[in-house]
Amino acid sequence: MSDLSDRLNPYKARAQRHKKAGMQARTAGNHALAKEEFDEARYAIDEAFEEIESRGKFSPSMTGPVDQVTKDQAFELADCWGIRGGIYREEGEIEQAIHAYDRGYELESDQKYGINSTYNTVNRLVLRLLGNPQHQGQGTSSVAGQASFERMRVPLAEAADAIDHKWRLMTDPVWALADMVLLKTLLQERDAAEWEARLESQARSRFPFESLGAVAQALAGSDPQVGTALHELAARLHDHVAQRWPEQKTPTVG
């Protein structure tokens, strides 16, 4: 862990804490409080960006060898763009979220920085698919939905290839494995089951399965073949969670 990472962790933690509080307030129907919490989350990640900038101007167009300080700066910038994208996503600001994820992707996909993360790489594509009205049940034709998915096939395959090359180098690869299961299911590739088994062997909590299941269900409004596969994936994930982490029943008294 770099010195820069140590400096940024409090800002990131504060941003994530306020984002979670905003989500809880929104679920409870307190939209005024939700807005306040999301605002605080953005202020926190803005401070993280300011801390990065205080270490020196970052130039993505640089050429030649990249030193470790610059690599650390690039990694943290990508991570902060991902956090900012997640905040915008929860606020419903989809275009701004995509823009943030795209900025993070530019760094993740640049080999000179050696960033072992694919968070932005995947989420920029998922949001584009979710942004298709067909996937939100707004009545566009299944042919239009299928055409949109087909246009995304190449970047989806490229994202899967990125995970394949990076996941073993990650400190905690579980979320990348969950993303890979989604990508392989969308691409209808034969090794999807192998990646699902790998996820099951690596995960130590129910949260990656629940998150993946929710995304799979949200994307299931694509063309019928992919939609069926996504529904089936969500059902398997639900069953796996129920078997591995069964809910504890409260004993009755009397």
Image (cartoon, grey):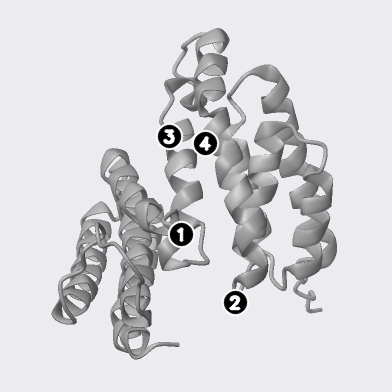
CA gap, disc 4 to disc 2? 25 Å
Is residue 207 visible in the rendered image? The answer is no
Question: Is label 4 or label 2 in front?
Answer: 4
Which tag, 3 or 4, sits closer to the chain's start?
A: 3
CA gap, disc 3 to disc 4? 11 Å
Residue contact at pointers 4 and 2, CB within 8 angstroms: no
- Image quarter where the N terminus lies is bottom left
Write the residue at 64% across / 58% down. 165
The residue carrying mark 3 is 128
Write the residue at 75% across / 69% down. 202
**Foreground of the two, 190 or 70:** 70
CA gap, disc 3 to disc 1? 24 Å
Write the residue at 60% across / 62% down. 166
Q: Residues within 10 Å of mark 4 (few under 14, many from 20)?
A: few
Q: Disc 2 marks which amino acid?
A: Thr
Which tag, 4 or 2, sits closer to the chain's start?
A: 4
Label 3 secondary element:
helix
The residue carrying mark 1 is 111
Q: Quadrant of residue 75?
A: bottom left
Q: Position of residue 8 (x, y in %)?
A: 30, 82
Label 2 secondary element:
loop
**Foreground of the two, 85 or 161:** 161
CA gap, disc 4 to disc 1? 17 Å
Residue 171's tag is 2
Q: Disc 3 marks which amino acid?
A: Arg
Residue contact at pointers 1 and 2, CB within 8 angstroms: no
The residue carrying mark 4 is 155
Residue 155, compared with residue 236, is above or below; it is: above
